[in-house]
Amino acid sequence: MNSWIKSSWKPLGLLLVMGTVVAGLFVPLKPGILDVNPQKLEGPTPELNCFVYNVPENWKATEVVLQSGPHQWRSNRLSSLQKGQISASFHPNNSQPESAFNRLYSVFVHLENDSQGTWMGLPDAVWLDLSTRSSDSVSTTVAQSAKEEGDRFSGLPHRPILNESIRNQFFHVPMWFAMMFLLLFSAVYAVLYLIKGQMDDDTRADAFIRAALVAGVIGCVTGAVWARATWGDWWPRDPKLNGVALGMLMYFAYLLLRSTLKDPLQRARLSSVYGIFVFPLFIALIWIMPKLSSNTLHPGSGGTVGFKKYDLDDTLKMIFYPAVIGWILVYTWIAQLVYRTKKLEQSQEQDHA
Amino acid sequence: MLNLLSSFNEAAVGFLVSEAKFNATATVLVIIMLGLGLYLFRLDRKLSRMEKNQEGRDT
């Protein structure tokens, strides 16, 4: 009974991971605007096609609004929502100042069902050319703000560019969290080895690094898939990616160093010192350096805002945080299995000797 | 035969453009995760057995 309680964190980790995998893959995405066409509005009566996603059948589009700061244009005519597409025509008037033209506008689509309404938007999606200015005067009543009506849909947030790939946040990001925690545990055991001199601590430190590298490789693969879907390249030029590559190489060098040393005491001492020095370098490479860089694609680094600012809404948090805990537990379990296997190998070697 | 082929194509195209493709991929991923979890459990139990045997030999 006591040992069952002691090892209950293992099924807990597995349950959290399974729950978040199922929720992360099957919770639907909220409705949103995928794209607009054309991206530059020209001429006296420009028409805009909005491609929308996941709008339930009982909801209909009632209005399309372009907004940029204080300037706002409402659609005069709107086609019905068919096959995820709405066409809206605009009639900009010349009562607006010239500053209302030749600028980027965000696109908002108003949705309504029998009892309620809501907005969905795509930021900085369309350029309004000065040629759209005409002599006719059309009233531009300010549309009800999205905040007043609130969000009527449940599910994962629909973010521009990310779209369905936002689900990867429950897989890619927890891998890095797990890797960093495991490397921290490894550094702690390396310090303990140098203080106490027990070989057990060195074996544990080694096992944590091996499991962390598995998490790192899976993190790289899931990140590459995500980067291809959002940034258009498997491995774009980004300080964080280059830092990760360098950091992982340093840890692969750790494995190489261990494999070349035959004397167990020398191997334990050298690799513990190496592990302690590499850990802060790794953190600097993947966390601090990208933050100092002014040009990075990852959220939360350089000039970009973190997920916390606008992407981590409550639905994401409900899946993301358990996923992080679950993956850390599962990787700790894997590290423990590696450690136990190595211990068994060591005792068998002693038996043979 | 041609009818059969065209109906198969329709079904295949329908599968690729519908949510079925996503659901199938997600289900496969869930099954892989379940398999990995089961593998970890079995490995853990096997190691426990081997550790017990080793302890028995040591004592």
Image (spheres, rainbow, N blue to C red):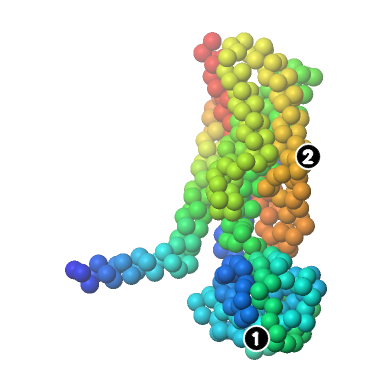
- Where residue A72 appears, as percent x and y from the top left, is 75, 77
Earlier along the polypeptide chain: callout 1 or callout 2?
1
- Numbered badge on residue A292: 2
The number of discs equals 2
Q: For residue A153, which quarter of the picture?
A: bottom right
- Residue B49 vs A92, above or below: the answer is above
Amino acid type shown at disc 1:
Asn
Which numbered circle lies on residue A76? 1
* Residue closer to the observer: A322 or A71: A71
Residue drawn at point x = 75 percent, y = 40 percent? A293
Question: Is residue A4 visible in this depiction of the protein?
Answer: no
Say the numbered circle drawn on residue A225: none
Question: Helix, strand or loop at disc 2?
Answer: helix
Q: Where B30 falls versus A187 (above or below)?
A: below
In the image, A17 versus A173, the foreground residue is: A173
Residue B32 image point, x, y percent: 49, 50
Q: Residues within 10 Å of mark 1 (few under 14, many from 20)?
A: some
